[in-house]
Amino acid sequence: MNNQGIENEEQHSPQITTINSDQKTGERHDSIVDLWATVDRSRLEQDVHIIPLDDLYQRFHTNPRDGLSAASVIDGQIQYGANRITPPKQPSYLRLFINELFIGFNAILWIASILTFLAYKPFGEPNPSITNLALAIVLILVITFNSMLNVYQEIKSIKIVASFSKLLPTIVTVRRDGKEQQILAEQIVPGDIILIRMGDKLPADCRFLICNELKVSTSELTGKLKPVTSTVHCTSEKFMESTNIGFYSSIVEQGTGEALVIATGDNTVLGKMLPLSRSKTSNDVTGLHREVNRFVLFVFIATIISIIILWITWAAWLNRDHHDFMSYNANIVNSIGMTVAFLPIGLPSTVTLVLTFVAKKMYRQRIIVKSLQIVETFNSISVIATDKTGILTENKMTITHLLWDTHGIYKVPIPEPEPTVPETLFQKIRRISTGMFSTTRRLLNEVISIARTLSSGSINVPQRMPSFSDHNEKNQIPNVASEIQIQAFRDLLLGACLCNNAEKQIVEDAQLGQDISKMQSELRLVGDAADTALYNLRVDRCGVDLEAVRKVNPRLKVLPFNSSNKFMISANQLESVDPSILESERTVLIIQKGAPDVVIQRCSSYKTNNDEILPLNAEMKQALFHRHEELAKNGYRVIAMCQQRFTRQQYDRMMKRYKEEQRSQSSTDVEDLNGFPSNDYCFIARRAQIRVVMVTGDYPMMAKAIAKQVHILTPEILEMNGIDTFKIEKDANELVFARISPEQKLRIVSEFQRRAEIVAVTDNRAKDVPALKCAHLGVAIQFGIEVSKEAGDIILLDNNFSSIIQAIETGRLLSDNLKKVAVYRLPEGSWSQIWPVFFNLWFGMPLALSALRATVFCMLNDVIMPLAMVTEKPNRDIMSQPPSIHGKDHLLNIKLLIHAYLFVGILECFTAFFCFCYYWIDNGVPFYSFVFTYEKFGLNGTTPYTMDQLQSMTNVAQSVYYCSMCLFQFFNFFATRTRYTSILQHNPFWGKGQNLYIFGAMFMSIAIQLFFTEIRWFNRVLGTGRVPAKYVMPTLGFGMLWLIIDELRKFCIRKYPRSLLARIAW
């Protein structure tokens, strides 16, 4: 790095940029924290970036070839601890509970409780009512219970998200005891040799040992916007500016390499800075919170208006004309009852519960949600921009054909899987005994062989490793393959071995649902799908020890594959049988592997079946392209290879000019397995009015073939082939973009967003991370790179496209269930409980529902049933509805209010009043004797009861009204379970609509009713009464009537979807 570059870098002090995004408006608010303001820079000026590598190895007791020993790892773990940054201290449960006591609805309830105490004394003197004291105590108990419930749900949701993070540990490839293995990032220690590839996130501070076109992004730490080209040598005396140092959390944008860990956990640069950058920030307000706040605002305004009407009526008319009917103290209590009736107590905990329920449901669908708030986005998804590999296909490839020249072909024999037959006990015993005998015999033979070798004294005689030139039975090459003596074919197999990054590694693994502490080690083939397919071709199909071949043909240089170049280049020094050949005369083989349309264009000659080298003219290129297209049409991915040989001396001079013309060798035909049921789910997405867009960098003909297989390809298809300027057609329901670069993919997502589409993007490549971040919903896959999993909002554990559709269905279920909760609560909360107060004021009749009973109903009965509502399963027609319009479809709308108030509310209120009046009339109190009587009720001689008896009867009548409301809400619950589907097709007893929580909630609701109405102590203290069953029986008739009316309404909506009834349906 030159001095000018260093001076420019000094102008960028390390910063952390915090971005707060408003989901509704899309506005971004950036706040920059200068971390250097309070950091002692001298402690970061170390010498680990300056001292020679040999001294560095000695300091950390390691070496680049073998890495740390097992003993050194144990010592390092004891000395440095786990490689994790200490998280901020979480507030205690007691502090959370105290905060909940005085925020939200609880603050209003505290005011109501204080006013109720005042209504008891001194406002209630000289004859204070014990009922008012009981109401005040009940309100305090409700505040306590509500706070405990909210704290419990918050803690539960935090623990669920934390448990999900344990299922997605960061895996790092290290070299220990001379073996490459994959371990948890938390287990690395200073001195570890880590292997780095594109897309990785550096797990610790490290010094680079090998850099193959390595570029690292450190923008979050150093403020440099462009990726830094990493080097092995020191470029600056300042630790933070030397390019041979990588910092924890930096992203590998390009290339591969190796590095030595110099600091872990809190000792990293980020670990030292992070405590200084933590500050108290307000929680982001999500769209779901806005909808809940909108609901609460509506309820609050309705409460204020109702209370104003109440006091105006009392002050302007009732207190003047009927002074003895209602005192201001009684009016205060009525106002409190009305407030409690309106408040949606338990709604915050219900929302948290439904988010938790949906997140756990998605986990069962093999989806991990990184934030509960992102669940709400699923309901609005209108476009899914998905990659082909790993999402629509299984990302498992198998070599099916080897091709060379214009007609040379070899079909790889693929054995058919044998049907599994259950093993009998005798067969199991026989297999175990045979295995034990074979193992014993093999060990004895090895002991005898070692003894003979030692006695002969030939133990130090070097033996040549097996190579592709060997033609014997030792390598167990299949007869069909061994009979092919064409050099082009054999060179193709050599390229499949050497130009390949797949390798066997020890991998830490855990079954789905297990904790990371339960991971077990196993030997597994690690690499991308194409490399593993080529690896399996050589090992499984040809029986060659591929690792031994790589040892005798060591790799000198590699240019890793990237989405821009679409090829990989490796240079290997070939083994030489003649030891007299000088090092400068050794042969170096340069192999290029990549997309056929890219590789073929770079070639000038090709090798025939007769090993002749002929010019690759335009006609031959066209023949090769035609052959490629025919295979791509059938859904095959074609990988082209070419090679050129140099002497080592020529290689040293020409390596920097690797883009020169090379000789075409051959290609491989790979089948990308379509192992997922994506085709059915593409139909489901289309029915749900969601556009499925394939965005891939693959060849257009292959993308088209895969699109046909998964049923994306329809007559309405529009294909885009990697063009720089494009225009998305509004009328095209499906789109296929082929040969798309990462920059174009980002433009595609932005274009959809500009058209007010809500976009979900799936991908697992480092270059596509900007598109993942830009999308409304970023979908990463479990087996993708770390940077994509960090950028994504959700992670697919099974890489299955069908999981995305299931997640959208679950997101729609969230919206549906919250609307159902609103429809369930509005009729009784802000309707059936306020009319008794107004009827009491305007018609001079006894109060049908006291403030105490309204409080009990709202705090207990009205909280239990919605908890069962949020566990509802999706209706059959949920994926037949269009996605909600972001910013326009609200939790509360005019259609829902019409249904809740004009349909359900009026009938429920009428039913409860019917039972209330039925009780009075049946007990000898005519209707005219308790309507418009005001303070003369019981004094006009029309009733044979004393005032004390009338008061007791009023207590029973109020309990009848209360029980009638509770019972009618059961029918409302069953009617609300479905919006358009018949209740018979979504019954709660069995099938997809099964929900046994309903009956538990109903049982608890009935138990609460009996608890407050049948226990004599409550009758005496709280002023309740025992309810004869016959007075609430009319509710059963009215409830069944409502079920029939609602079934007819749903039938008309399904039969006539364009009718007026369908247009006003919620």
Image: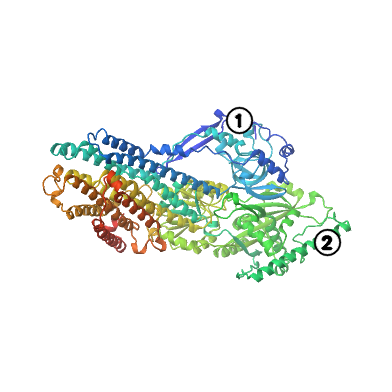
Residue 727 in view: no
Residue 845 in view: yes
What colour scheme has been applied to the protein in the rendered image? rainbow
Residue 7 disc label = 1
- Toward which corner of the image does residue 405 lie, by quadrant? bottom right
The local secondary structure at tag 2 comes to: helix
Q: Relative to residue 182, is residue 1031 drawn left or right? A: left
Provide the residue designation for mark 2: 448
Residue at 21% x, 38% y: name it: 311
In this rendered view, identify the residue nearer to me: 887 or 186: 186
**If the image is split into quadrants, where does the C terminus sit?**
bottom left
Q: Earlier in the sequence, mark 2 or mark 1?
A: 1
In this rendered view, identify the residue nearer to me: 845 or 679: 845
- Please tell me whether residue 951 is drawn above or below residue 422 in the rendered image: above
**Where in the figure is residue 484, as x and y percent of width and height?**
72, 67
**Where in the figure is residue 471, as x and y percent of width and height?**
77, 65
**If the image is split into quadrants, where does the N terminus sit?**
top right
Amino acid type assigned to the residue bearing label 1 in the image: Glu
- Toward which corner of the image does residue 104 lie, by quadrant? top left
Amino acid type assigned to the residue bearing label 2 in the image: Ile
In this rendered view, identify the residue nearer to me: 145 or 629: 145
**Where in the figure is residue 632, as x and y percent of width and height?**
56, 62
The local secondary structure at tag 1 comes to: helix
**Where in the figure is residue 222, as x and y percent of width and height?**
57, 35
